[in-house]
Amino acid sequence: MEIFFKFYHSISHTFREFFVYHYSSLTFRANIFALVIAADENPKLENFITLKEIAMEIYNEDEKRANALLITTKEIVNDIQKNKMSMDTLIDKIQQELHNTPRYANKIDSKTLLQFIPLADDEDTKLYRQNIIEFLEKCKNETLEKRKKK
């Protein structure tokens, strides 16, 4: 059964890359949301419900794109939970993507990300999420400043 799931996951990921409009942009957003959600070792269902609501707003009620963002984010969170990827690796990916595609900095919306803080059960996780959001905001501002100077 696990082999089937891995095969299905691989195929579905590949097809999304070809058939989802602006998949790299969507993946960047998924990385941002996954970083905040995965700050909680055991994220609750409410995190993903909130993400779906946010995705519907971002993509103007486009259910397919919202679902693609939700699924991609869940996959990244699962990779972190299963130690296939670390939070540090995800941070490096985000920073590299900002370096390669500075316009993605505009996709970091701290106000939206703050909605995930109250969904954490303990204060340590809330603080960790807050620190991650502050870090992302700093990365955004630095990237936008560099872009202005060019």
Image: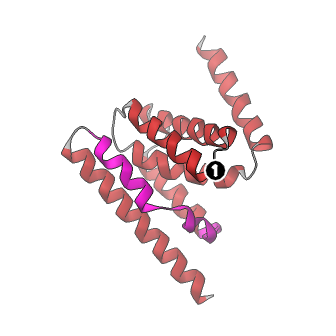
Q: Of all residues shown, which one is farthest toward the top?
A: 1
Could you say which quadrant of the image residue 150 lies in?
Answer: bottom right
The one nearer the camera, 41 or 25, is 25
The one nearer the camera, 3 or 135, is 135
Residue drawn at point x = 63 percent, y = 19 percent = 5
Check residue 106 for magenta coloring: yes
Image color mode = secondary structure
Residue 112 image position (x, y, % from top left):
44, 55
Residue 28 image position (x, y, % from top left):
59, 54
Q: Which residue is mark 1?
A: 59
Secondary structure beneath label 1: loop
Check residue 42 for magenta coloring: no
Residue drawn at point x = 61 percent, y = 71 percent = 102
Residue drawn at point x = 39 percent, y = 34 percent = 46
Could you say which quadrant of the image residue 82 lies in?
Answer: top left
Residue 145 image position (x, y, % from top left):
51, 82
Q: Residues within 10 Å of mark 1 (few under 14, many from 20)?
A: few
Boundaries of the magenta span: 99-120
Q: Is residue 82 above or below residue 99?
A: above
Q: Quadrant of the N terminus?
A: top right
Q: Is residue 101 above or below residue 94?
A: below
Q: Of all residues shown, which one is farthest toward the right?
A: 18
Q: Is residue 25 above or below residue 55?
A: below
Q: Is residue 91 above or below residue 142?
A: above
The one nearer the camera, 93 or 50, is 50
Residue 48 image position (x, y, % from top left):
46, 36
Residue drawn at point x = 44 percent, y = 49 percent = 35
